[in-house]
Amino acid sequence: MAGCTSRCRQGVLKLIQSLQRLVSGTLTKDKTDDELEMTMVCHRPEGLEQLEAQTNFTKQELQILYRGFKNECPSGVVNEETFKHIYAQFFPHGDASMYAHYLFNAFDTANNGSIKFKDFVMGLSILLRGTLREKLEWTFHLYDINRDGYINREEMTEIVRAIYDMMGKYTYPALKGDVPQQHVDAFFQKMDKNKDGVVTLEEFIVACQEDETMMRSMQLFENVM
């Protein structure tokens, strides 16, 4: 079991490396290497054409990403423990466990405790290549922890604190204990237009579109990818 878990972690780390190449635009630069990788794909996702139509990735990109997800993680799913372990490696000076927990839940749209390739790539398609509204909608759902269609102060505070914990000593400037709450109060003052104590999706999108600084602050996934 330990060997399988280790192999799965290595596979998802390879997937993240592929994602970094996607972001930088160098994924298909070396065609020889890419063709070699594709010949080594032992498992291919069913309905690849359908997935290509549903995402902003090409068929070749999906095949390469799938190799990192499935060939090295034969179960075809990533559980929360593995997801947290991966994130901890990227943020060694802080505690990434809570943010990884919330991020995992955002990808786990079926709420069954695991992320399949389709779940992962659908989310990544939005975050990396979606429209501004699509990205903001995804971010809203990350903050909507209980999935009731609203963001309350407690939910936003939990996410903000999780991010500060993850960044650890690299959080700048040095933060006092009440700073996360101060940030949440400032966000709510701008977002909660009707002062009913919760933020709706439309309030969230409008506030972010009106305030560039707030938009950068709320699109946190891209900053910690």
Image (cartoon, rainbow, N blue to C red):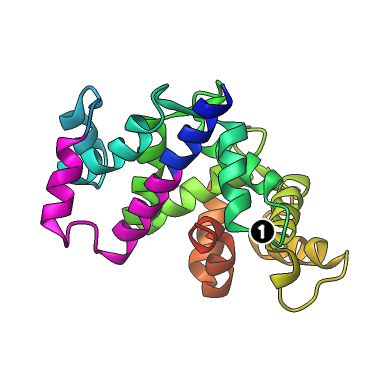
**Residue 26 visible to an observer of this rendering:** yes
For the point 57% across and 35% down, the residue is 82
> Residue 46's image quarter?
top left
Magenta stretch: give its range: 13-40
Q: Is residue 46 magenta?
A: no
Residue position marked by numbered label 1 in the rendering: 92
Whether residue 35 appears in magenta in the rendering, the answer is: yes
Please tell me whether residue 61 is drawn above or below residue 192 in the rendered image: above
Task: Name the image quarter holding residue 165.
Answer: bottom right
Name the residue rendered at 16%, 60% in the picture.
30
- The amino acid at mark 1 is Pro
Q: Position of residue 103 (x, y in %)?
A: 57, 43
Is residue 144 at all visible to an observer of this figure?
no
| Rendered view: 128 above or below 26 | above
Give the camera-side residue of 93 and 225.
93
Q: Quadrant of the N terminus?
A: top right
Name above or below for residue 4 compared with residue 186: above
Residue shown at 55% from the left, 42% from the top: 141
Foreground residue, 216 or 92? Answer: 92
Q: Position of residue 157 (x, y in %)?
A: 76, 52
